[in-house]
Image (spheres, helix red, strand yellow):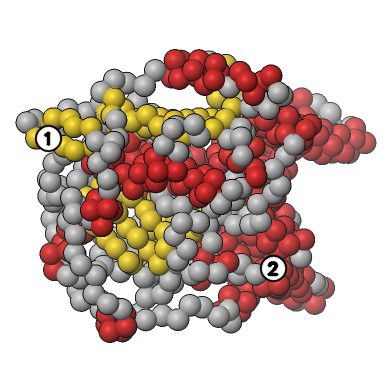
Amino acid sequence: MIGGMALALGDALPPVPTGAHRTVMRFLKRKIFVGTINISYAESICTLVFLGLNAIWFSAVFSRNYDALVEADSTDSASVFRLVGQVFGFNAILCFSLLIIPATRNSFWMISMGIDYSHAIKYHRWIGFFTVAMVALHAIPYYYAWFKSGTFLESAFPCMDCDYGTVGKGRLQNFCGQLALLCCLIIGVTSLSPIRRKYYDVFYYCHHLFILVLFLSALHFSQFVIWMYPAVCLYVMHRILARSQSRMPCEVVDLEAIPGEITRLVFRRSPGKSGHYHAGQFVYLRIPLLSHTQWHPFSISSSPIEYEDTFTVHVKCIGNWTKSLYAVAIQAREERKMPLIYVDGFYGKMSDDFQHYPALVFVAGGIGATPIISIVGKILDCMRNNDPNMEFTQVYFHWTSREIGIFHEFEPLLDAIEQYDPDHVKFKVRLCFTGDQHLGGVDIPNGITLKPMDDTSMVPTRPFFQSSRSVPRQMLLFFITFTCSFWCLFLIRLNYPILGELRVNQNMWPMQRVVEVLIMIAGAAVGWAVVFTEPTPRSMSRMEKSRLMPTLGSYGPQETMANIARGSEYSHSLSFDGQEVEFHHPVSRSRLNVKELFNEVVKEQSHNFAVNITGIGTWVSGPWV
């Protein structure tokens, strides 16, 4: 219940902090740069709390078990070393119980702490590597003892002709623990940055080994399922929400390939709270024509205020999937067909941090500017609406790109800024072009083979909406998910029915533990009833839409309505390979000097320091070079 309320209220933007609260919030966001370490004070505090919790846990468990060794007069070095390994196992259980929480996209704990999913996944990696280390440290003392005593085969592998209810129980538990260790090592190795970035599919599919880890660990230690109950419920709830809002294809308003190998996608969204998003958030896209399994994240580039029933995503051709998407956009235009696209979102920070600072500096590179463009659009809309929090705000927007086409694509926003602030008092925009190619055309990328596109005009689509956004429905979802899973787990562990009366069927203990995990997951899955009964936007086939909506004219990349409406007051002409390209905003051919930029900002903000209106918020988005 508390979790549901926290998640529901998390969507409402918090008040802009003032006074000491604002000072503390800014301090926690400051970065610590020591060598290659780049973390904020808040992250360092969370890290210390996590390590401190593990240290306290280790000390408490070790002290309790060491007292038992003293009473048994078994305090020799071998026994103590084995005890250390046993205690590391309890630390591993603690880490496992926390590991899934940052990886759930709808985790109310992360939202309540102001940590969005894109940043929380970093904690998931840190806790994951620490967990693998704890599991390895748990196993090492046992391997040492087995090899030293010459009982490795008898201890590490199960027996084939013994009773698993007595003699063989410990051997099977040890074997399951080793398999869980092997799975953890595979997950850990494939999660290393070089492997994850270069072989993402390997990383993705190896991560599914966590299902085996869950069952094997439950077979290894009977209480493991109790520790995993909260995290599993959260994860199942996350999967329910994600599956519910992405089980039908989303209505695509526009799919266009534009110069610079950039694909523009415009989706319809529900106009109510279920379709609301915040500037800077992102979505996951899946296109069955390209892949039935791959979900790719992309930032939303449109302002949530200006466009009430749509949102826009821009995709730059980088890998095979994005190049194939660009080719599909060209193919869809030529064949007058539209591929089915599934959307899952909205994810990312649900707050407008830009309201915390009187001076905002945005530094963007290439297509990485899309989340910043969404934020700048939101700021412009707030200023137009005379938002009191933006009364003294000044924005410095510096954007560097090697493709000239992306400047053309977002020129309507630049025009709107120029129209609102022609004297450049509120907005100071600088565009830096560092490429040397011409604007270019719209061609299918090299090495991409087009696939036949089926006619999907009769397939129903619907506006995108987020499942269970109302407070009562969220509270109901949390209550049913956790309560049903709890009672299922409680009843299956009450007197252990699979083991029989008085637990006489001890050889059935593996089945008992496997069923406990399965029934815990099944109980949490009852939450499907909440989202299944939720009213959804009416789905319509494209044939129905074409009869109800007027046909829109077709404009090429250089002849869109935005281009037609642009004035020429701020024109600036550049030549690329002999081709004249008309700009309506000045473009610099030099690279951005970050040091000079901040010196300029500090100098211009000196008047705010004098009246105690201080603070410079900085956002950087783009590829690392």
Specify the quadrant of the image occupied by residue 309.
bottom left
- Within 10 angstroms of label 1, few (less than 14), some, or many (20 or more) residues? few
- Within 10 angstroms of label 2, few (less than 14), some, or many (20 or more) residues? some
Q: Residue furthest left?
A: 578
Q: Position of residue 174 (x, y in %)?
A: 62, 48
Residue at the disc numbered 2: 471
Residue at the disc numbered 1: 580
Res. 163 in view: no
Q: 97 and 499: which one is in front?
A: 97
Residue at the image point whose x is 58% and y is 54% from the top? 104
SS of the residue under disc 1? strand
Q: Position of residue 252 (x, y in %)?
A: 33, 67
Are the two marked residues, 2 and 1, in contact with CB atoms closer than 8 angstroms?
A: no
Does 105 sit left or right of 44 as displayed?
A: left
Q: 456 and 529: which one is in front?
A: 456
Residue at the image point whose x is 71% and y is 23% from the top? 611
Mark 2 to mark 1 CA distance (whole Å)? 55 Å
